[in-house]
Amino acid sequence: MSTLRSRSIEPVSGTAVTVDGIDAVLSSELSAIPSRYAVLADAAGATLAEPLAAAAALPVADTAAMDGFAVGGRGPRWRLLIGTCVAGRRSRIALADGEAVRISTGALAPAGATAVVRSEHAHIERIAGQATVVLAPGVPHRNDMRLRGESWSEGDELTPARVRVDAAVISVAQSAETPIAMVRGPLRADVLITGDEIRASGELAPGQVRDALGAALPLYLRHCDIGMGRLTRLPDDRTLLRTWFELDTDAELAITVGATGRGVADHLREVLAEIGARVIFDGVRMRPGGSHLVAELPDGRTLLALPGNPLAAIAATLVTGPALVRALTDRRDSPSLWGRIADAAAPASDLLRIVPARQVEGGVWRANGVAGTAHLANLLHADALALLPPGAGRGALVELLPLPR
């Protein structure tokens, strides 16, 4: 059995959902994983479980925003003292009214400093034999000093909970002396690719096809903030499939590729019923990728079962993967990307269509032709997957799922 939390669940058969309904179904049927303390620099793609608050003010003291002169008093002339205030060191220099000292960007302002005058606003003259900083003619007196707490004060909330840990969050946390915080995730998934005809390496036998997803799927999962655990390939064998579900793991997700159809070699639903899995939804009203499903396994993991055709699998991953991350890490909804599709005319259908699209001059989007599901060639020059609702016409405003670059 898995080393994850285990609880008794009632096996039920899920029903198909719409793309728009996936978030609501998952958020109501799945519980968020436990939170943990993590070094944020090592937790990109996780979700903050608590607001991020500053442990220290920024800046921690008055500092120079520009190279120039720290001055005492209004001037416009200041007697230049010997020495320089540099970043990273505390100076023993103290300024009296009418005195100045050289200062570098980021250096602590010396005691007695009332302002920092940037270099280009002043020059040095010798007046009565004394080096003197003189404000340039016509330059207004301004202060290029960053005051303590100007950016934030100790205890200030920098970002709320339920947001993604990205590069900006990591950087701000470092600046605020809060490099460790409570997070959920990032999620990790064990992946199983099934199919007697799938071959990863070596010469293809008659009827076999190359594994087109094993090397690419981790990139698409990472784009959804899902890390890759074990990758396993198995033939279409019911016993082996059940054994895979019972392997020990600490991954939060199980992802299968293939066996989501209802053919003679597709054993997934039978095995899920045998092990007592709870199917949350079985099918999404979309094409391609409509046969994918989500279930809760008896050991507490969540299963995302993807169809075997490569484009269908990627479409399902980009539609449902982020929704799983939102539900399992309690992430706040992120803004959607929308655009005008220049050629959305579609054959009559009551299903949402997913087509690769690229952005062209003028900001509009154009579909990459008729997409074949057996390969990802239509993604070679695509920027996103466009979600075309039934009846979408030329110039329709549609939701776009950005592709990893």
Image: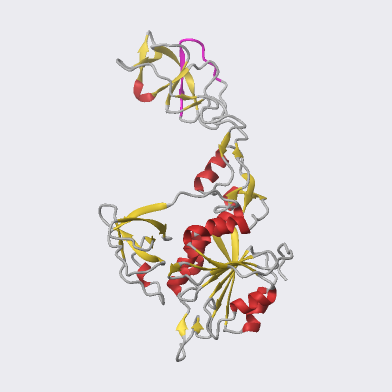
Decide if residue 172 is in sight here.
Answer: yes
| Residue 198: image location, x then y, percent | 50, 82
Residue in front for this viewpoint, 305 or 217 = 305
Query: What residue is rendered at 58% in x and 37% in y?
Result: 176
| Residue 364: image location, x then y, percent | 29, 55
Task: State which quarter of the image contains the N terminus.
Answer: bottom right
Query: What residue is rendered at 53% in x and 24% in y?
Result: 62
Query: What residue is rendered at 70% in x and 63% in y?
Result: 4
Quarter of the image for residue 315 reads bottom left
Query: What residue is rendered at 72% in x and 62% in y?
Result: 5
Looking at the image, is 43 positioned above or below residue 5? above
**Residue stretch in magenta:** 93-104
Residue in front for this viewpoint, 102 or 126 = 102
Quarter of the image for residue 397 reads bottom left
Q: Residue furthest bottom?
A: 206
Q: In the picture provided, is 177 more to the left or to the right than 6?
A: left
Task: State which quarter of the image contains the C terminus.
Answer: bottom left
Q: In the picture provided, is 376 more to the left or to the right than 1?
A: left
Looking at the image, is 149 positioned above or below residue 278? above
Determine if the magenta segment contains residue 187.
no
Looking at the image, is 133 positioned above or below residue 284? above
Quarter of the image for residue 155 reads top right
Looking at the image, is 390 positioned above or below residue 336? below
| Residue 350: image location, x then y, percent | 40, 67
| Residue 312: image location, x then y, percent | 45, 71
Residue in front for this viewpoint, 191 or 71 = 191
